[in-house]
Image (cartoon, grey):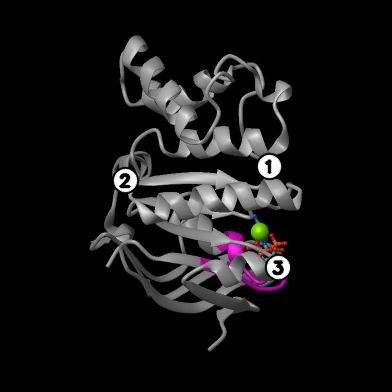
Amino acid sequence: MTISCKDLAKVYEGGKEGWPALRGVTFDIKPGEFVAVTGPSGCGKSTLLNILGLLDEPSGGSYRLRGRDTGAMSDAERSLARRDGIGFVFQSFHLLNRLTAAENVGLPLLYAGVEREPMRERAHGLLGRVGLQGKERKTPLELSGGERQRVAIARALANSPEIILADEPTGNLDSASSREILDILFGLNAEGITVVMVTHDRELAARAGRNLRMRDGRLEA
Ligand SMILES: Nc1ncnc2c1ncn2[C@@H]1O[C@H](COP(=O)(O)OP(=O)(O)OP(=O)(O)O)[C@@H](O)[C@H]1O
Ligand SMILES: [Mg+2]
């Protein structure tokens, strides 16, 4: 099992008793699945994705990632597991506007200690893979929204992750660009990468192999 969550709970601080964003969520995701997470605004989708991506820790329950209990990991182990196993794609791209597309894609490799020239080659290869050959030297501000998201996907692929977590990756895009981004994610899934994608778009969700529907911090049956 790639992802195995049991009774996952998350209470954010605030107010007298805090705010329960996840109230006991149990599910497994097998290697190679394409899972869409849907549900109304505020139901806990991003909270769940952040926990799956080891960006945040649950307040209760357990999360096993590739068989390992993440609750027992040190901060350093969590960082490594995140760096080497998980690629992130966000709604608002999260690219650095002062860097070129290739430099943005190369950044995770830089952190992983890859030398300059192999880093450049790999970044160019990844940009080619998402259809951005020739745009390596453009900065995000010189690219369209769809192109920016493709740079973000290339960056997410830099360390050859087994899992891609995408939080409303098409939320800021028109329908044509959305379809392109989804086609890329499906292509990656066809190559064996597990994809978990939060989306508000029912049509996109319908294309996924499986839907997890959330409401008020719980999974609907
Ligand atoms: N850092 C935080 N501190 C306190 N409460 C938070 C925090 N982040 C989220 N919440 C609350 O937790 C609940 C779940 O939030 P979350 O962002 O997971 O929802 P979501 O399903 O992703 O919504 P959306 O579709 O609008 O992105 C919300 O009620 C939100 O207000
Ligand atoms: Mg959200």
State the residue position of label 2: 81
What span is colored magenta in the figure? 36-47
- CB at disc 3 and ligand 1 closer than 8 Å: yes
State the residue position of label 1: 92
Q: Is residue 134 above or below residue 180?
A: above
- CB at disc 1 and ligand 2 closer than 8 Å: no
Mark 3 to mark 1 CA distance (whole Å): 18 Å
Residue farthest bottom in this picture: 221
The reply to whether residue 18 is visible in this rendering is no
Q: Earlier in the sequence, mark 2 or mark 3?
A: 3
Dot 2 alpha-carbon crowd within 10 angstroms: few under 14, some 14 to 19, many 20 or more: some
Dot 3 alpha-carbon crowd within 10 angstroms: few under 14, some 14 to 19, many 20 or more: few
- CB at disc 2 and ligand 1 closer than 8 Å: no
Give the structural element (helix, strand or loop) at label 1. Answer: loop
Q: Picture coordinates of residue 1 (x, y %)?
A: 27, 68
Disc number for residue 178: none
- Inspect the image, locate mark 1, and give the three-letter code of the amino acid beneath it: Ser
Q: Quadrant of ligand 1?
A: bottom right
Residue at image position (33%, 46%) is: 85
* Badge nearest the viewer, 3 or 1: 1
Q: Earlier in the sequence, mark 2 or mark 1?
A: 2
Q: Picture coordinates of residue 183 (x, y %)?
A: 54, 51
Give the structural element (helix, strand or loop) at label 3. Answer: loop
Q: Earlier in the sequence, mark 3 or mark 1?
A: 3
Dot 1 alpha-carbon crowd within 10 angstroms: few under 14, some 14 to 19, many 20 or more: some
Nearer-the-camera pick, 126 or 11: 126
- Inspect the image, locate mark 3, and give the three-letter code of the amino acid beneath it: Gly
Q: Is residue 99 above or below residue 151?
A: above
* Location of residue 18 (image quadrant): bottom right
Q: Residue 13: say if magenta.
A: no
Disc number for residue 42: 3
